[in-house]
Amino acid sequence: MSSTVYLNGDWIAPEHAKVSVFDRGFLFADGIYEVVPVYSGKPFLLELHLARLYRSLREITITVADDAFWHELVRDLIERNNYGDANGLIYIQVTRGAEASRAHLPGNSLTPTVFATISPLAIHWDQPAPARVTLLEDIRWLRCDIKSISLLGNILLKQQAASVGAVEPILHRDGLITEGASSNFFAVHNGELFTAPKNHLILPGISRDWVIELAHEAGIRVHEEPFKVADLPQLDELFLTSSSREVQPIGQIDDIIIADGQCGPVTAILIEAFHASKRRLLNSRR
Ligand code: PDD
């Protein structure tokens, strides 16, 4: 947990950080967020995370500060919480702000609420054990490309997955796989990589894009195209990506055992490439 969090220009102890009950984030989940991993005090793929933050803000028509503000915020979060040599996850949330009373349509002159905190992140250098996932219908809204704080759909799906002992629900809409409830989803078939295209049905994951980049570098062909639930039993390997999981192999999806329940060879290459990119960051100058 952070020893100090950022709230609307102040650095304060978490227990003293308070927002109005009329904040539109509290009343309507009217806001967006961003999550940035930090390895040994260095933010990983920061420019890509900030670009997605700006996009989310633009999509919901909130204007907040400039590039320099966000860079300074990230630097201060790390320094003020003594994460100079530690691994962490930065959480940034921006809501449309507080009003005098509850009304669906926001007023024009609101001051956005900006909150940021950092918490410990366990990073690994090994091959994670293959996970068990479950297939569920994607019940979320149709703007999953916005990193909205409105996560009720995701939460219900996560609860349903946990109730059958799965670590993540894999979601499908109209017979096509979209993503996980807090991760992107990849499949390997005949040595080639498949993942859903970037559109309104998935979050444009930063780790997703990074893994695609790493696959290109490793000479692995990538197809960003929808694939069918019905094709799952034929696929050779499956894995998830996210800022906290990095690359997580899948060993079982409901009753289907994938890659003999092991981490497949293409997934292993990508896990190693991901580790290598972390090592490059750690060896770079601050
Ligand atoms: N979740 N898809 C969804 C729905 C997500 O919530 C996330 C990340 C991802 C992966 O995105 P990225 O690679 O940029 O982390 C995909 C974050 C970590 C969260 O909700 O905390």
Image: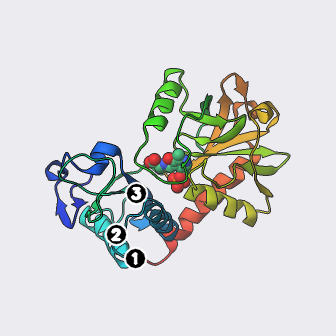
The residue located at (28%, 45%) in the rendering is 26
Q: Quadrant of the C terminus?
A: bottom left
The percent coordinates of residue 172 (x first, y second) are: 65, 35
C-alpha distance separating marks 1 and 2: 10 Å
- The residue carrying pointer 1 sits among few (fewer than 14), some (14 to 19) or many (20 or more) residues within 10 Å by Cα, namely few
The percent coordinates of residue 3 (x first, y second) are: 21, 55
- From the image, tell me which residue sits under label 2: 64
Residue 145, label in figure: none
- The residue carrying pointer 3 sits among few (fewer than 14), some (14 to 19) or many (20 or more) residues within 10 Å by Cα, namely many
Eyeballing the image, is 39 above or below 129?
below
| Element under disc 3 | loop
User: Do residues under tags 3 and 2 come within 8 Å of each other at their CB atoms?
Assistant: no
C-alpha distance separating marks 1 and 3: 23 Å
The residue located at (51%, 31%) in the rendering is 157
Q: Is residue 84 left or right of residue 144?
A: left
Q: Nearer the viewer, mark 1 or mark 3?
A: 1
Front residue of this view, candidates 30 and 218: 30
Q: Nearer the viewer, mark 1 or mark 2?
A: 2
- From the image, tell me which residue sits under label 1: 67
- From the image, tell me which residue sits under label 3: 87
Eyeballing the image, is 190 above or below 157?
below
